[in-house]
Image (tube, rainbow, N blue to C red):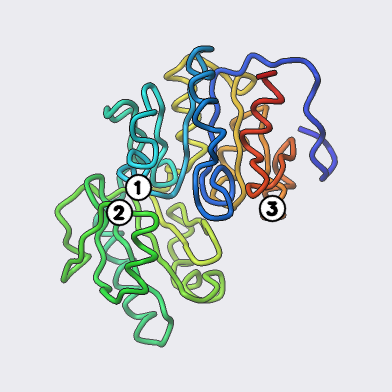
Amino acid sequence: MSTTNAPRPAAPARPDIRLIVTDLDGTLLDADGRVPRGLWPLLDELRRRGVVFSPASGRQYATLAHLFAGVDDGMVHIAENGAFVVRDGVELSSDPLDPAVSARVVKSVRQLVDEGVDAGVVVCGKRSAYTERADPAFLAEVGRYYRAHRLVDDATAVDDEIVKVAVFDFGPVERGAAPALAPFADTHQVVVSSEHWIDLMSPTADKGAAVRRLQRHLGIGPAQTMVFGDYLNDLGMLDAADWSYAMANAHPDVIRRARHLAPAHSDDGVVRTIRTLLGL
């Protein structure tokens, strides 16, 4: 890694890239939250070259599968911030959360709401996401990231294998909901995934761990891995790749951590960078 804070430019030689992992929101998706049109033909070219493409997101598997429906042959979906990884409909790995811990988080958020914080909790299972809060504004935010979600009376008692608990705060999450989850940080992964979302997972679950397991599964290493990210939940996977890119719009900590800098997500940074580096 470069000894300076500024990301160094990509080397001119063509690396032997075998795995490309990209975050979605603020990274691959454009400013309107859409997959850039240039990605679709690029996926065909990558597949012909034997390069595995993997979206890695805090979103659930059902959402990722819908987003890439019809073009995801061989694609690896790293869902729920790395806690659930699926390829061609087959689970490659998962890192479930203790239901008792999930219940404690739900109760902590309930107390937070009672104190006046405008927040809601989403319990994320393998089959669906579950929430107790039913107002349209909150469900609209949930629906953006969780295509499969259900309203339940008691989110502490869902019948599913839980992989993550997410909290949405209509205000800045680092000042609102985050302090309520701080007591869990010593024993679990607690990551701020955007300005309004914070996620809690198993202590061994994150995007970086998922990428390393995937590398072992594919028989490749960091030198053959390209990763793109923009927010704090992407830090772990940046460390798993020699070709790690922060988007120009990324959080300052992500820019400091990555080896290289890509154009902003609003400027088609992921697709442009892949084409340039691989000479496509």
The residue closer to the viewer here, 62 or 189, is 62
How would you rate the neighbour count of disc 1 (Cα within 10 Å): few for under 14, some for 14-19, many for 20 or more?
A: many
Asked if 76 appears above or below 204 in the picture, the reply is above
Quadrant location of the N terminus in the rendered image: top right
- Residue 181, given in percent of the width and then of the height, sits at 44, 67
- Residue 136, given in percent of the width and then of the height, sits at 31, 74
- Residue 260, given in percent of the width and then of the height, sits at 74, 36
Dot 2 and dot 1 residues touching (CB under 8 Å): yes
Asked if 128 appears above or below 204 in the picture, the reply is below
Q: Which residue is mark 3?
A: 249
Q: Which residue is mark 2?
A: 124
- Residue drawn at (72%, 15%), measured in percent from left and top? 14
Dot 2 and dot 3 residues touching (CB under 8 Å): no
Dot 1: element: loop
How would you rate the neighbour count of disc 2 (Cα within 10 Å): few for under 14, some for 14-19, many for 20 or more?
A: many
Name which residue type carries label 3: Asn
Dot 3: element: loop
Q: CA distance from mark 2 to mark 3?
A: 28 Å
Name which residue type carries label 1: Gln
